[in-house]
Image (cartoon, grey):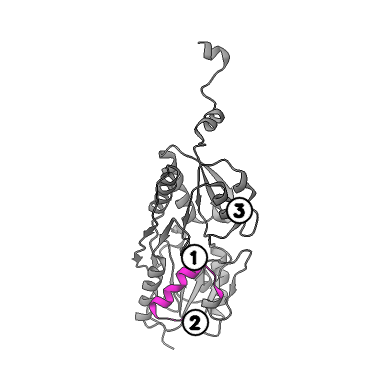
Amino acid sequence: AAAADLGYHGPSPQARALRSGRTGVVGLIVGTEMARYFRDPLSLAVLDATVDALGAAGKGVLLLPTSHAGEGELVETAAMDGAIVLRNATGGEPFVESLSRRGIPAIFTEAPEGVTPAVNLEDAEATASLIRQLAELGHTRIGAVTLPWRPETRTTVVDGDWHDVVTASVARTRLTGFDLAGVEPCVVVEARSSLVEEGIEAARIALAHPSAPTALVCQSDVLAAGVIVAAREQGLTVPGDLSVTGIDAITLPWLAPTEITTAFQDAVAKGQALARGVVAMIDGEEVADVRLPMPVRAGTTTGAAPQV
């Protein structure tokens, strides 16, 4: 009754944090262009699974935007016990250095070799499987539409050998699938982001290339959907004139009855693994890297190479 009279609603969260040295908050670090992030169905599925798992562990979340080249002021000052890096990071960015300097444990997703701990995908192997299937169908001119690896890029063709051009990124990891399959891409187009409109633009560039690809291996289903739309605009049939593959196995009902031949990314398992990892690190435990398989799912967008 006295507490009610005084308007006392319980212990002060700020005082409790000072006493325990814990905030109960995990920082979720994404890129600066959050509008694009929240338009990507796969990213949203991973975020949803991550937040659910953290909530079950009694952790709140704080979304933190960062730039690829900025100083990361919010990461320098935000109150958090740990961090999950939901964007591809090479480990040398200012925000990564800030986390390390502050002693904040962090776990990464789809990170290059040496950046640890991380939840990674067997995406190079999955890409190789898709390429081998295309080769078995008689395709010899196979191109690639990649995720972006450069900040502030535009959708453009990659000049020169991609091995010398593409830096550490998800795009590079998935391009190594061509090496695993023993196939050299006839054209590589870097998309500005994983959006349908960028897939459309990438397809226009790839299909106008002198190599005349008969198949395009896309690094996301959203990009693949854009490629299919662009092919239809040009009067091409999929897979009669052009075979298309994706990655992620997301649901795109507006594309029905077309179903993209793709590799399944378990967004729920990914988000849960990230949450478990950061909670364990906050509790002082050692955390090992996790690798999630990506089984290939047959669809209706791949077929025999067209006869010339």
Residue 58: quadrant of the picture: top left
Q: Position of residue 79 (x, y in %)?
A: 57, 40
Q: CA distance from mark 2 to mark 3?
A: 35 Å
Q: Which amino acid does the dot numbered 2 rest on? A: Cys
Q: Position of residue 246 (x, y in %)?
A: 44, 67
The stretch of residues the image draws in magenta is 165-184
Front-lying residue, 15 or 147: 15
Mark 2 / mark 3, whichever is N-terminal: 3
**How would you rate the neighbour count of disc 2 (Cα within 10 Å): few for under 14, some for 14-19, many for 20 or more?**
some
What residue is at 40 percent from the left and 81 percent from the top?
Answer: 182
| Residue receiving disc 1 | 170
| Residue receiving disc 3 | 66
**How would you rate the neighbour count of disc 1 (Cα within 10 Å): few for under 14, some for 14-19, many for 20 or more?**
many
| Residue receiving disc 2 | 186
Q: Is residue 250 something one can see in this rendering? A: no
- The answer to whether marks 1 and 3 mark residues whose Cβ atoms lie closer than 8 Å is no
Element type at mark 1: helix
Front-lying residue, 35 or 256: 35
177 is within the stretch colored magenta: yes
Magenta stretch prevailing secondary structure = helix
What residue is at 46 percent from the left and 68 percent from the top?
Answer: 173
- The answer to whether marks 2 and 3 mark residues whose Cβ atoms lie closer than 8 Å is no
